[in-house]
Amino acid sequence: MSSINLGIFGSGDLSAGFIGWSPVPLTVAGVSSSGTKSVTLKSRSLNGSISQVMFMAQAGDDPSDQITIDLGAANRAVILVAGKWQDGKRHYGASEDSKDVAVEAAWADQPAQVAGSLDLMIRVRKNANLLSDKARNDFLDALATLNGIQIGATPAEGAGKGIYVTDFVYSHVEGSYLNQHSDSMFLPWHRLYLLDLERLLQQVNPAVTLPYWKFDEKAPTLFTAAFMGETETLPPNTPFTPGTSTYYARFDAVNPLSQWKIGENNGIPRASFFDTKNEAAKGLPASPGTPAFRMIDQNATLKLGESGVFGAWVMNPAAGRLRPTEFARMEGAPHGAGHVSFNGPVNSPPVAPQDPIFFLLHCNVDRLWALWQLAHQRDVANEAVSYPYQTQSDTNDAWKVISSPQWPWDNSTSSPGQLWPPGTRRENFTPSPTAKQFDEGVPLLLDAIDPYAYHQADNYLGFAYDDVPFDYGRLATFPLT
Ligand SMILES: [Cu+2]
């Protein structure tokens, strides 16, 4: 029997096998002993999973569960494959924590004989409160490894001195006083920042994705000693203490976060202004001398951008400063409200990533942007409704223009102020075997606007959210390369 070789296009490693909701090219190749050129491909869920994939012969076709194609004279064809989004199902049909779905290929004249197969993981970002124990532990192990904590025999730099600290904690420090916040580039810059970390996590374990903390719902399995730490609830009228907390998150001894360090500092100072076991985050309650800063839920967040305009920051003469408009307002609530739902480093931008809950919070912020983009089709980078600063005349800061290369990956030639992060995040955006490589390792802001690659197949960034499906109504614009 002659075999059929299958590979995800764009990957040097044919077994890489990680996809999301976006259609990506699947290479099918082989020579049949019978002379047939016709191959049938179908999806098979593995190990009791519900995951399935779908096929399209070319862009614009309706996706189907099974497809028969002709390999032609080249004995090779390239079609499209994508994870099958299943509304209402667990993780919307995404893989739980491993490769749990296979593409099976058979020569059409011997349909019962599997001549080739490729195991895949529909690897998307999932609700942290719903992760399997394995997905949770894989994430924690990978995160701790990047912090220099020894997991098994993994060599590391030493707890508190890993790349998580030298690059991610400090690059937020250096830039946060300048331009990463309080303007419309907040969302695209942080999307790149999250993706860089996620790709590093995937170098440790390719099955890992960043989970999101859906902060407008209670997340009792997230704030546990087995995951991101049991968190003390602050009594009413507790003062807001920027960057510090007298309480620390509590962890099981087997949880690698129990060894968390930043530099020489042990542990994660954190206490919450809400009951993490029974409530959603509420933001900062009013206390003597401090007004409330309230959380808003997902529907209210999406309504901030009801007009379908991303929104610039414009001068408000009464306030004497720039204020956000339209969807850009979400940087305040829910984003800022998420941060100030705690005392501890996470409530203060210059030090917030010291507490890794930062990345789960920001993953949800990014997800809300992705949901809004889907609702309004706001993924065309050169439209001002997708991102307001299209040319230098739109902003006083060159760094915020859509075509601008981004710090710290740009060898620090752009704003802010030629700063050098202490680590390696310059000219060194983490590569991915199955998604876009940035030219010379330097992403531009515009690279962040269309991660599902509706407009350019080679813009696919290799991440997706479980509840943000690919919009097949627009597949006709997706070119096959
Ligand atoms: Cu933030």
Image: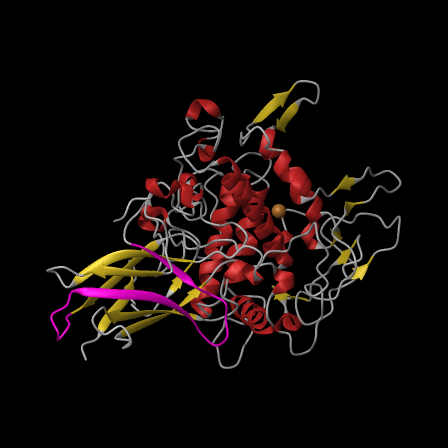
In the figure, residue 418 lies in which quadrant?
top left
Choose between 80 and 407: the one closer to the eye.
80
Residue 166 position (above or below residue 50): above
Choose between 122 and 292: the one closer to the eye.
122
| Residue 424 percent across, percent down from the top left | 43, 57
In the figure, residue 463 lies in which quadrant?
bottom left
| Residue 449 percent across, percent down from the top left | 44, 41
**Residue 298 is at least partly visible in this image:** yes
Q: Is residue 433 left or right of residue 150?
A: left
Residue drawn at (73%, 55%), measured in percent from left and top?
344
Residue 118 position (above or below residue 413): below
| Residue 402 percent across, percent down from the top left | 42, 34
In the figure, residue 76 lies in which quadrant?
bottom left
Residue drawn at (29%, 76%), measured in percent from left and top?
112
Choose between 164 and 263: the one closer to the eye.
164
Q: Is residue 152 left or right of residue 1?
A: right
206 falls in the magenta region: no
Q: Is residue 229 left or right of residue 34?
A: right
Residue drawn at (32%, 49%), measured in percent from left and top?
440
Residue lying furthest top in this view?
A: 317
Residue 179 position (above or below residue 21): above
What colour scheme was applied to this rendering of the protein? secondary structure
**Residue 99 is at least partly visible in this image:** no
Query: Magenta residues?
Result: 31-56
35 falls in the magenta region: yes
Choose between 183 and 399: the one closer to the eye.
183
| Residue 302 percent across, percent down from the top left | 61, 38
Please state the total of marks drawn on the protein image.
0
